[in-house]
Amino acid sequence: MNRLICTLAFVALAGWMAIAQPRPNILIIYTDDQGYGDVSALNPEAKFKTPNMDRLAREGMTFTDGHSSDSVCTPSRYGLLTGRYSWRTRLKRGVLGAEGPCLIENGRMTLASLLRDHGYQTAMVGKWHLGMQFAGEKGKDRDWSKPFTDGPIEKGFDRFFGIPASMNYGILTYLDQDRVTTPPTLWTRKKPGLVVHDRASYRIMPPYDTERDGNNLEVAPDFVDEEVLEVFTKKAMAWIREAARQPKPFFLYLAYTSPHKPVAPRQEFRGRSQCGAYGDFVVETDHRVGQILALLDELKIADNTMVIFTSDNGPENTWKGRIKMYGHRSAGIYRDGKRSRYEGGHRLPFIIRWPAVIKAGSTYEGPVCQIDLLATFADMLNVSLPPNAGEDSFSFHPVLTGGRIERPALIHHSAAGEFAIREGDWKLIVNKAPTGRGAASVPVYELYNLRTDPSETTNLADEHPALVSRLERLLERLKSSPRSVPLNR
């Protein structure tokens, strides 16, 4: 009887402590096209230093096998926010433009709506790139005085400040809640950029034109590409200051536009790296991260703030030129880059710092994915996800306190709509290659053991035909199923 009473008392105490433990503030810093090798803590041979990103690794947990859910902007952002693969939606390949129906349908749970519904203040600052709808049609009957619809504040965010999409898609102005701050009534086209080895390098900067005349980018008179990082950082810091004064914890999704093109570091950061303008841009990005971290220290809230640092996909194709010109490998040891199913397309910097809980300087080597954040946050809040949410999300909450998980198979996806599957150490890429003119496509398999061959150099498909067959069947089953993670997990 005494043993039973003691056991019940312990369980009650543990439950009370779980309730009494303050919920953490949550800050996701999401960079754009930043490869695994673009953080100096992850790449000792990097041609620039990232001391603030390195600080997060030193004071937090580095996930060396962390992935985005896709290899380009829109689908990765969808997966991050919803815990669901984007290829389950209408978007089967590529990305969205600056405007149009949002890929996240109204009513679908997001990180923001989950946290908002459980007592969090929620905000987003930065690049959206999931679709929003503006009044009028490009070049015809625009009415910038009207609110836009289908944006972040309809998907769980209390506050939003940012831009619609990547800068090469136009509608270049800052958005505040559901309004444009300055009407994008001028026109421009891409201007010559700063990256000498990249013929497609460009800038978005004045002077702008009053007539379209072949120009295809709508732009506000006060918009300049090199100011965006500073503007986002100041807005994020202002919101954090305001949120920190409130009794509720906060969630901020800070989606930077760098080092995605246009590569446009401010003047004071130029020449700061040994990797040209691209390296300088990463150096500025790191500086902006440092400003955020310094604010958390100043406000004395760093200890119970979970900072998640990661990127939407691997590096742009300019990674090839950086190897030749500077000896810098943006993807580190991993193969290929943005748009690809190889590891360089989706294995990314993935670091979480939460000093109150996570052991400083720790490392986790098992596979995790950005789609797993929804289930992880739900686990942290001790709530269950409904059947129509987080269909591909698997909680890694135990990992944060030193545990391990056995994550079910991950599916990787290319910009062209091609698939690969990862289970344990094994990764299978299924290609469809024509055998001749008019002939039907036949499968071509690539099988890699990522534990022994993380750079994907040796195709073992012919040596393991039974494994290839099993993984292909699993891939097809998960693609046709509405979810890849069991509901009762």
Image: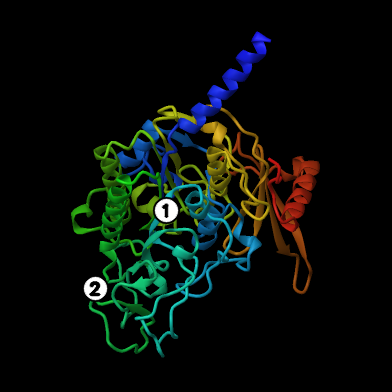
Q: Report the quarter where the N terminus lies.
A: top right
For marks 2 and 1, the one nearer the N-term is 1
* Residue at 32%, 79% in the rendered image: 184
Residue for badge 2? 222
Circles 2 and 1 in contact, beta carbons < 8 Å: no
**Dot in front, 2 or 1:** 1
Indicate left or right for 480 with 33 as reference: right
Q: Position of residue 80 (x, y in %)?
A: 52, 53
Taking depth in this image into account, of 199 and 96 the one nearest to the observer is 96
Q: Secondary structure at mark 2?
A: loop
Q: Position of residue 149 (x, y in %)?
A: 46, 73
Q: Residues within 10 Å of mark 1 (few under 14, many from 20)?
A: many
The quadrant where residue 42 appears: top left
The quadrant where residue 37 appears: top left
* Residue at 26%, 69% in the rendered image: 224
Q: Is residue 456 visible?
A: yes
Taking depth in this image into account, of 155 and 400 the one nearest to the observer is 155
Q: Residues within 10 Å of mark 2 (few under 14, many from 20)?
A: some
Q: Position of residue 35 (x, y in %)?
A: 44, 49
* Residue at 31%, 89% in the rendered image: 211
Amino acid type, residue under disc 2 in the picture: Asp
Q: Which disc is residue 122 wearing?
A: 1
